[in-house]
Image (cartoon, rainbow, N blue to C red):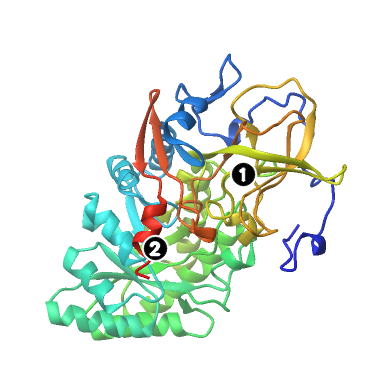
């Protein structure tokens, strides 16, 4: 279902859920694949994370609130580190970034991708070693590139000829030789939403492989000799479950490696295949494990290098969603429950599209559970919606909740660690929720709740 701009009466309205959604045998069950690893339902019926009840979290921090299971996030970092022990793992900061998360991923031995000056500032202020930072972005400003060079950022992924010229001039001024990768648009369209598929030709990122721009960018860097070209970069999209796209991408980008070797006598030592690895938002999703990904990606790269008679380059990957996405859930309080005479039941919560825009923007699907108590009521197919003045303000399009769900109940939505707080807004002048990290039964605030005073402080009137 896509929200219609003219309002709900013009949208696709049905009281039937999607084909994959099954009526649960027990409405209180939690599907482990959807939740942080320490989440359980206690003997009192309330959901708990790392031994701490969501009722206690709501009482201390209010709702809505993003709840991060710190041990879960760290364990996912370790899973990738174990699966890719010799490769570089760049956590994609755009998924969710704050100083506490920077410290966590740094302590777990990961690198960090940033794509704006603000993300770079956050990384540096949290103490991330600059040599472990990669800088992405299709329109890096002079000031952003200058800061990256002055900080000693480990690599810059160049995205346009203008950027190559801009960075070359800045490097000459400083007498430095920054390491760069060329972002290649390989013409592979991942099986994902149009707006998050990033490797087909008609989009803003990278240098076209088919049109020859990628080769020309590499030749330009090598011929000028100011920047140190370390390798090529490819990213084919997000929320990807099928590895076939990576196979096609690797084949094409390694063919370009061979072309560069044959034309300039230089065999580039690095290859970054990007990220975009999918997670389970609902029971229809079946993501690969890091071990499965590692086995498949290595096989792809080894095979294609053999075909092109290339030495196997040092590999990098960029998981973001796959690390932080499952580690977080959002906790809401129910405000109203509205039954449209059997057409649909709307459960309205105290957040919405300002704290999770993905349902409206990408037609994303989520799950939910009644979190503050258990219930013996029958399952009710409901739609969880927000408080904003938009008919498309939907948090969970279709989910079974207990038929006795009522105002004051707490509802938890799993899988909200990636691109929810990062893309949050102040639509309708709603302050953004806090982020609370829980570990060993203790909660700590890592991003505070915005206040109305924060909003008014920017309004100079």
Where does the image place residue 450, in percent across and percent down from the top left? 40, 50
Where does the image place residue 390, in percent across and percent down from the top left? 66, 60
Q: What residue do we see at 37% from left, 84% from top? A: 161
* Residue with the most extreme top position: 43
Check the image and report above or below for 230 versus 452: below
Few, some or many C-alpha atoms within 10 Å of disc 1 (few <14, some 14-19, many ≥20)? many
Q: What residue do we see at 28% from left, 54% from top? A: 123
Dot 2 falls on a residue whose secondary structure is: strand
Which numbered marker is on residue 271?
Answer: 2
Whichever of labels 1 and 2 marks the residue nearer the N terminus, that label is 2
Q: What residue do we see at 38% from left, 66% from top? A: 459
Q: What residue do we see at 30% from left, 43% from top? A: 109
Pick the quarter of the image with the N terminus.
Answer: bottom right
Query: With 218 as the anchor, is 72 left or right in this view?
Result: right
Please name whichever residue, 131 or 40, is drawn nearer the observer in this view of the structure: 40
Check the image and report above or below for 302 versus 166: above
Where does the image place residue 429, in percent across and percent down from the top left? 49, 58
Asked if residue 410 shows in the view, the reply is yes
Where does the image place residue 154, in percent across and percent down from the top left? 25, 62
Which numbered marker is on residue 281?
Answer: 1
Check the image and report above or below for 83 versus 160: above
Query: With 248 as the anchor, is 323 left or right in this view?
Result: left
Please name whichever residue, 299 or 72, is drawn nearer the observer in this view of the structure: 72
State the separation of the CA atoms marked 1 and 2.
Answer: 30 Å
């Amino acid at each position: 279902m896509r929200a219609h701009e003219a309002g709900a009466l013009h949208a696709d309205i049905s009281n039937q859920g999607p084909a994959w959604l099954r009526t649960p045998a027990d409405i209180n069950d939690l599907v482990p694949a959807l939740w942080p690893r320490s989440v359980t339902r206690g003997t009192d019926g309330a959901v708990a994370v790392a031994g701490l009840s969501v009722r206690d979290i709501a009482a201390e921090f209010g709702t809505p609130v993003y709840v991060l299971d710190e041990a879960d996030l760290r364990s996912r970092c370790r899973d990738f580190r174990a699966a890719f022990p010799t490769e570089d793992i760049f956590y994609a900061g755009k998924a969710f970034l704050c100083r506490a998360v920077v410290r966590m991923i740094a302590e777990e031995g990961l690198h960090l991708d940033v794509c704006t000056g603000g993300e770079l500032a956050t990384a540096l202020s949290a103490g991330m070693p600059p040599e472990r930072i990669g800088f992405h972005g299709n329109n890096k400003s002079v000031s952003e590139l200058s800061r990256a060079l002055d900080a000693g950022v480990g690599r810059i992924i160049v995205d346009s000829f203008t950027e190559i010229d801009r960075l070359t001039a800045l490097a000459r001024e400083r007498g430095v030789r920054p390491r760069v990768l060329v972002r290649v648009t390989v013409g592979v369209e991942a099986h994902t939403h149009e707006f998050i598929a990033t490797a087909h030709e008609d989009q803003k990122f990278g240098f076209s492989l088919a049109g020859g721009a990628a080769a020309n960018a590499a030749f330009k860097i090598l011929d000028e000799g100011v920047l140190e070209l370390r390798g090529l970069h490819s990213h084919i999209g997000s929320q990807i479950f099928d590895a076939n796209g990576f196979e096609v991408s690797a084949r094409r980008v390694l063919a370009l490696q061979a072309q560069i070797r044959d034309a300039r006598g230089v065999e580039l030592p690095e290859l970054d295949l990007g990220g975009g690895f999918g997670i389970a938002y609902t029971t229809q999703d079946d993501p690969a494990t890091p071990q499965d990904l590692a086995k498949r990606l290595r096989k792809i790269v080894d095979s294609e290098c053999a075909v092109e008679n290339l030495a196997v380059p040092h590999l990098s990957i960029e998981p973001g969603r796959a690390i932080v996405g499952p580690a977080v859930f959002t906790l809401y309080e129910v405000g109203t429950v509205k039954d449209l005479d059997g057409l649909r039941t709307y459960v309205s919560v105290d957040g919405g599209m300002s704290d999770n825009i993905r349902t409206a923007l990408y037609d994303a699907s989520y799950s939910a559970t009644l979190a503050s108590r258990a219930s013996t009521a029958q399952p009710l197919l409901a739609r969880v919606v927000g408080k904003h003045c938009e008919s498309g303000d939907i948090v969970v399009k279709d989910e079974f909740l207990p038929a006795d769900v009522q105002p004051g109940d707490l509802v938890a939505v799993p899988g909200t660690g990636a691109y929810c707080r990062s893309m949050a807004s102040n639509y309708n002048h709603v302050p953004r929720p806090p982020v609370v990290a829980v570990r060993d039964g203790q909660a700590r605030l890592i991003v505070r709740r915005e206040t109305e005073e924060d909003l008014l402080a920017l309004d100079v009137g």
